[in-house]
Amino acid sequence: MNASESAGGQGGLRIVIIGLSITSSWGNGHATTYRGLVRELARRGHDVLFLECDVPWYAGHRDMPHPPFGRTMLYEDIDALRQRHTDDVGQADLVIVGSFVRDGVEVGDWVHDEAGGIVAFYDIDTPVTLARLADPPPNEAPYLEARQIAGYDLYLSFTGGPVLRRLEREFGSPAARVLYCAVDPELYHPEPCEPAWELGYMGTYSTDRQPSVESMLLAPARQWAQGRFAVAGAKYPQELDWPQNVRYIPHLPPAEHRAFYNAQRFTLNVTRADMIAAGWSPSVRLFEAAACGTPIISDRWEGIETLLVPGQEIFLARSSAEVLQLLRELPETERRAVGARARERVLAEHTAAHRAEQLERYVFEVRTAAEA
C-alpha cells in the first residue's frame, strides 16, 4: 500500500509525534527508533513534525540536534507545547504520543481535547508501563494513566503477543497493535575487520539486567582470562569491579554502533525483567546486531523464536558455561552462517521501512472502521 492509499486517497498524512527524544540517544533507545520511523514516513510522502521536550540531560548529549528528515521542534514545557502547537495537533491526520514523555498524562489529555484526526499512543516500554499502572512508583509522575488507554484510537506497542489482547480486554483499547523496534540497514551492515572482542554487550545499566550481564559476560570473562570482552552503556556504577579483560565504554553514540558490533565475534542480548515476563519484546540492539551479521547470544523469553530461529539465526543461553562453550567451541563456519541467516531474516522483516508500512496499515484500518 502506498502513502496515498493509506491516507484514504488524499496524499500523504500530516503526522505529529510527541516523543521522549529524537535528538539524543544518550541513555535511551527511543531516539534511534524515532529517527528510523520518521525518516521512512517522510520518504513515503508524509509530513512529519516531531516535538521533543527540551531537558538538560539530553541537551548536553545531542548526537543529532537537527534531524535531516521531517521537522523537529523543541518545547520547554507543557504550557509552551499548548501555546505553539495546538493548531499542529488539531490539523494533523495522526497524532502520536510516546511513552516516557515528560508530563505525558497532561500531554495526552491535551492531545485528546485538540486532535481532529486519529490519536495513538506509542509505547516503547509496554511491560514497564503495565507494571507502573499496577504499582505506581512513589515520587514519580506517570506518563500514562489507565483511564486514557481507551481514548487512544491506536495503542502501538513495542511488545507483541498476549499483551495486546490484555490492553484491549482489560484497559479498553479499541486497537492494540504491535510496532516493534526496527533497524536501519543503511547504518547497520557487515564491515570486514579483525575482531577485537570475543563477546560484547551494549545497554544502559539497569539493576534487573545486571545479573544476566554478570552471569553471561562478566563471569565468562573471569573464567577465560585469554578472552577479550566489552561492555558499552551509560549509568554503570563507578564502584563496579570490571575484570581486567573487559573494556568498559561509558557511552557509544549511534554513529559508532556498527563498528562496535562488527568488532565482536558474538554479541550479547540481555532483556529487562518486565520484558522477559511479558515476552515478545525484542530490543533494538537485537535487530542492529543481526543486521551487521554478528551472531547473537541471548537470554530466553516467550516469543523470541517468532523473530529469530534458535540454533539457526540466534543462540540462546542460560549460563556462563553455555556462553563459554559457544565462544570457544563453535566452528567458525557455523558462527558466520548463523550471523548471515539472522541478517537475512531481519532485513526481510524488521527494518524501519517495514514499520512505516505497518503504521500506514494500522491507520488505514482505524479509518476504515470509523467510516463503516
Image (cartoon, rainbow, N blue to C red):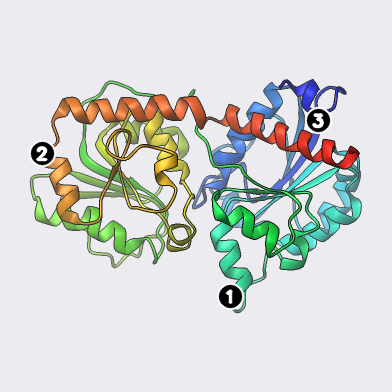
Residue 329 bears which disc, if any?
A: 2
Label 1 environment density (alpha carbons within 10 Å; few <14, some 14–19, many ≥20): few
Whether residue 191 can be seen here? yes
Label 3 environment density (alpha carbons within 10 Å; few <14, some 14–19, many ≥20): many
Q: Secondary structure at mark 3?
A: loop
- Residue 327 lies, in percent from the top left, at 16, 41
Give, as a three-letter code, the residue at label 1.
Pro
Residue 42 drawn above or below residue 236: above
- Residue 26 lies, in percent from the top left, at 50, 49
Q: CA distance from mark 3 to mark 2?
A: 52 Å
Give, as a three-letter code, the residue at label 3.
Leu
Q: Are marks 2 and 1 in contact (CB under 8 Å)?
A: no
Residue 137 bears which disc, if any?
A: 1
Picture quadrant where residue 338 is located: top left
Q: Nearer the viewer, residue 142 or 163?
A: 163
Residue under numbered circle 3: 13
At 57% across and 48% down in the image, what residue appears? 158
Which mark sits nearer the N-terminus, 3 or 1?
3
Label 2 environment density (alpha carbons within 10 Å; few <14, some 14–19, many ≥20): few
